[in-house]
Amino acid sequence: MNKIISVTTKLNCDSLRAFEMFTMNELLESWLTVRADVEPKIGGKYELFWNPEDKMNDSTIGCKITGLEPDKFLSFEWKGPRKFRRIMNECDPLTHVVVFFLPFKGKSGEPITEVHLIHSGWGNTPEWEGARFWFEKAWRDSFKNLKKLSDK
């Protein structure tokens, strides 16, 4: 059985701004990573670095954007940190992240965007299950940071 991670949050911004939080380097660096090198186009880089001094580890180096429609949808490949490198970073295909941006109006007419993230491609071994549990917590914690950023 191929399990997934599913995380959702509501952001206090329009869907274009929410999309930018996943595609603009400086915004990604304010909630998800230390350094980002993202080219927001299909086939463009989706490389995030949690330890920029060691770019080959604890990064998504080599990952690409697999689909996008500005302010609506984004998908990209994903790699794991050093402790999951052997299973996550050397498999084909890599795990995959899909993010949907759904615009709404708040009670006073202010823009709100519901962000849905689905991370799939997990294997069935105990090692894979450990990686999935680790990322489930990591995505939930990161979405708390994202929510705080949208509340500013």
Image (cartoon, rainbow, N blue to C red):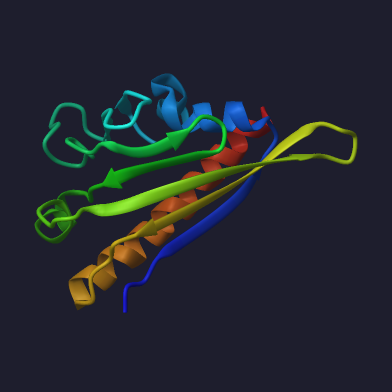
Screen quadrant of the N terminus: bottom left
Q: Residue at x 39, y 43 (%)?
A: 75
Horizontal side of residue 141 vs 39, given as left or right: right
Q: Residue at x 41, y 61 (%)?
A: 136
Horizontal side of residue 124 vs 117, given as left or right: left
- Dividing the picture into quadrants, the one containing residue 32 is top left
Q: Position of residue 58 (x, y in %)?
A: 20, 42
Task: Please count the marks in the image.
Answer: 0
Residue 149 appears in the figure: yes
Horizontal side of residue 65 vs 92, given as left or right: right
- Dividing the picture into quadrants, the one containing residue 48 is top left
Q: Relative to 40, say whether 96 is above or below.
A: below
Q: Position of residue 28 (x, y in %)?
A: 42, 29
Q: Relative to 118, say whether 66 is above or below.
A: above
Q: Nearer the viewer, residue 78 or 146?
A: 78
Screen quadrant of the C terminus: top right
Q: Position of residue 98 (x, y in %)?
A: 42, 49
Q: Position of residue 2 (x, y in %)?
A: 32, 73
Q: Residue at x 48, y 61 (%)?
A: 6
> What residue occupies the far top of the structure in this picture?
26
